[in-house]
């Protein structure tokens, strides 16, 4: 008889961090988010030159979108796919090798001036391609066809990374190019698809546990499916033609649809539990970001980067922190309760987003935003690192 997932993890006698997919990628992904922002501060104050073939702004954008987010997506998928397919998780040295490939990509992109042209791109892209191959194998073996959508999104996200590398090699403005927009749009769709499953589900469970008779609208109703279908079309147009009044109007409609979708999930009833309300607030940045970009175009302020940070830092940063904290607590055998340190992490992240937006009026807030961002992700690594590095406690008799 084959081993169960729990038996396979217990059979691993190496470092506990390689006993499940979320452990190395959540811990070091968060660490990278803090470190890369610290490097960015060093660049902004004029005391450091990044030894990368990317220009500094492009490196900054790539480090978060295709560096950090790829790690968190990997941690999530390597943990979720075994539940979706009923197959064994990837653990041990195979997981360590995959993690090392991600780390090699970060080093290669950062130091690409010391590598032959194209070498850093190949190393960086090797990780998502290998990850996608592993996930495809598991989906086929488990005949879990409904989750091919998630794999397709990973494939498009990787294509965005490819385009980003090509644009940077051509000395184009990759930080505002097709590759970044394609990657960012795909990330937003990932949140819309996966968040649309987990937010109403977790909210329902919490409300039921409290004896609250209110219930969120179930996941993936006809309205949800229609919203996602429309979202794909709007985001494709934004990727291809970002500066257009028609695109702005489409983004405004996109925002209104997602606001209504979110309102149906009873988020206002979850204020007593940070692990739940943080999911709702993180999702709120999807419609807010779309509306901000629409307003930027219609009002002619010509500062798309500021509006895009609502999606980059707010939606992506907020949702990934929400998922990482909840998954770490659950999979390390702890109660699903947010302590004061966790709440502080969430607040630092959201204040970082607000400060970044306000820096357009008060430039001095830009550094504050960066410091708050570092505090959020460094806070996660300090507070959750011990749980990620330690084995899951064994259940005792009667427990």
Image (cartoon, grey):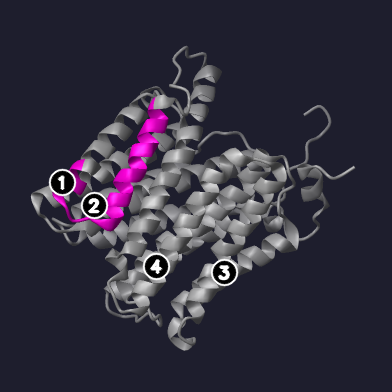
Against 150, residue 381 (above or below) is below
The residue mark sitting in front, 4 or 3, is: 4
Q: Which residue is mark 4?
A: 163
Which x, y percent locates residue 149?
52, 44
Q: Which residue is mark 2?
A: 307
| Mark found first going from the N terminus, 1 or 4 | 4
Q: Which residue is mark 1?
A: 295
Judge by depth and name the residue closer to the eye, 66 or 382.
66
Is the magenta region chiefly helix, strand or loop?
Answer: helix
Q: Secondary structure at mark 1?
A: helix
Judge by depth and name the residue closer to the eye, 8 or 333.
8
Q: Is residue 224 magenta?
A: yes
Check whether the beta carbons of the residues at disc 1 and disc 2 lie within 8 A of each other: yes
Which x, y percent locates residue 250?
23, 42
Q: Residues within 10 Å of mark 2 (few under 14, many from 20)?
A: many
Q: Residue at x 39, y 34 (%)?
A: 280
| Mark found first going from the N terminus, 2 or 4 | 4
| Mark found first going from the N terminus, 3 or 2 | 3
Q: Which residue is mark 3?
A: 126
Q: Spatial distance from mark 3 to mark 1, Cα to Cα? A: 38 Å
């Amino acid at each position: 008889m084959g081993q169960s997932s729990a038996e396979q993890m217990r059979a691993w006698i190496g470092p506990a961090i390689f006993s499940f997919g979320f452990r190395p990628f959540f811990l070091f992904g968060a660490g990278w988010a803090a470190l890369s922002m610290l490097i960015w501060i060093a660049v902004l104050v004029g005391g450091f030159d990044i030894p990368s073939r990317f220009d500094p702004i492009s490196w900054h954008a790539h480090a978060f979108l295709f560096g950090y987010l790829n790690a968190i997506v990997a941690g999530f998928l390597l943990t979720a796919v075994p539940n979706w397919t009923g197959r064994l998780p990837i653990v041990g040295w195979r997981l360590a090798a995959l993690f090392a490939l991600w780390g090699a990509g970060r080093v290669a992109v950062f130091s690409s001036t010391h590598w032959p042209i194209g070498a850093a791109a190949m190393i960086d892209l090797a990780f998502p391609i290998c990850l996608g191959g592993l996930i495809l194998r598991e989906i086929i073996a488990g005949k879990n066809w409904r989750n091919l959508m998630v794999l397709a999104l990973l494939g498009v996200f990787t294509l965005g990374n490819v385009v980003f590398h090509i644009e940077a090699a051509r000395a184009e403005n990759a930080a505002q190019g097709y590759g970044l927009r394609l990657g960012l749009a795909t990330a937003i769709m990932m949140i819309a698809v996966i968040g649309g499953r987990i937010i109403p589900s977790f909210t329902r469970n919490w409300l039921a546990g409290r004896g609250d008779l209110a219930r969120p609208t179930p996941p993936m109703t006809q309205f949800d499916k229609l919203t996602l279908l429309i979202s794909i079309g709007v985001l494709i147009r934004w990727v291809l033609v970002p500066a257009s009044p028609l695109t702005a109007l489409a983004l405004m409609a996109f925002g209104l649809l997602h606001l209504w979708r979110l309102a149906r999930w009873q988020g206002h009833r979850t204020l007593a539990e940070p692990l739940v309300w943080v999911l709702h607030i993180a999702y709120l940045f999807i419609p807010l970001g779309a509306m901000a970009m629409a307003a930027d175009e219609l009002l002619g302020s010509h500062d798309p980067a500021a509006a895009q940070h609502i999606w980059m830092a707010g939606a992506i940063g907020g949702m990934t922190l929400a998922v990482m904290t909840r998954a770490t607590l659950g999979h390390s055998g702890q109660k699903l309760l947010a302590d004061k340190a966790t709440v502080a992490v969430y607040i630092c992240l959201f204040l970082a987003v607000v400060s970044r937006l306000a820096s357009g009026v008060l430039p001095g807030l830009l550094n504050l935003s960066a410091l708050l961002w570092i505090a959020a992700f460094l806070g996660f690594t300090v507070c959750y690192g011990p749980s990620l590095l330690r084995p899951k406690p064994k259940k005792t008799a009667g427990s």
